Image (cartoon, rainbow, N blue to C red):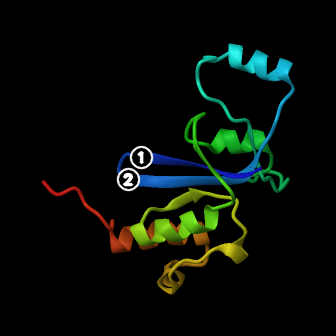
Amino acid sequence: MPATMIRLNLVKGLGPVLQIAEGWTVKLPDEVTDTLMERTNPTWPCTWFTPRCDGVKGSTFEDAYSVMQNWGANHGAISYGHVGADLITLCSILRIPVCMHNVPDSEIFRPAAWNAFGMDKEGQDYRACAAYGPMYKNIR
């Protein structure tokens, strides 16, 4: 089934950043699942997931190994469907940069003001979020 895996990383000096990987759940043969589960903790819930990759040498989404090399940790939250574009829009509203995603450019909506922060879309997120500041602040 189509699924989206996300991870919110808290980066010292920067704050929260979101990683998004759209892909699909997969069924592995029982002997493969059993072997992998015995290497971790078989009581943990598990969903096998494969990201949509582009095969471009050196890209973050070249293959599943490069995705995991760039992922904040070996865990993520998985939701049904490809909802990455919605999450990118939500992050722009909340002023949380998206540091990694495989959502097609044609599906992404960010505020038009982001265009004033340079030509590279990922960098725009960081610069716009820094300029506008967080939507919510810890008030003490």
> SS of the residue at dot 2?
strand
Q: Residue at x 63, y 18 (%)?
A: 40
How packed mark 1 is, by other alpha carbons closer than 10 Å (few <14, some 14-19, many 20 or more), is few
**Which of the numbered marks, if any, corresponds to residue 117?**
none
Residue 136 position by quadrant: bottom left
Q: Looking at the image, which is closer to me, 57 or 26?
A: 26
| Amino acid at dot 1 | Leu
Q: Which residue does the numbered mark 2 point to in the structure image?
A: 15
**Residues at circles 1 and 2 in contact by the CB criterion of under 8 Å:** yes
How would you rate the neighbour count of disc 2 (Cα within 10 Å): few for under 14, some for 14-19, many for 20 or more?
few
The relative height of residue 118 versus residue 35 in the rendered view (above or below) is: below
Residue 53 position in % (x across, y down): 80, 52
Up the image or down, 128 lies above or below 64; here it is: below
Answer with left or right where residue 95 lies relative to residue 64: left
Which is more toward the observer, 43 or 120? Answer: 43
- Upstream in the sequence, badge 1 or badge 2? 1
User: Across the whole image, how many numbered discs are drawn on residues?
Assistant: 2
Of helix, strand and loop, which one carries label 1?
strand
Describe residue 111's horizontal placement relative to residue 120 as left or right: left
Residue 85 picture quarter = bottom right
Q: Which residue of the protein is positioned furthest toward the top in this rendering?
A: 38
- Relative to 69, is 104 above or below? below
Q: Residue 54: where, in percent of width, then height? A: 82, 56
Real-space CA distance between mark 1 and mark 2, rounded to the nearest whole angstrom: 5 Å
Q: Residue at x 56, y 36 (%)?
A: 73
Q: What residue does disc 1 label?
A: 10
Q: Nearer the viewer, residue 139 or 11?
A: 139
Q: Residue at x 61, y 54 (%)?
A: 20
Tell me residue 49's x, y (percent).
Answer: 73, 41
What residue lies at 60% left-to-right and 33% top-to-bottom?
A: 74
Q: Give the amino acid type for the residue marked by disc 2 in the picture.
A: Gly
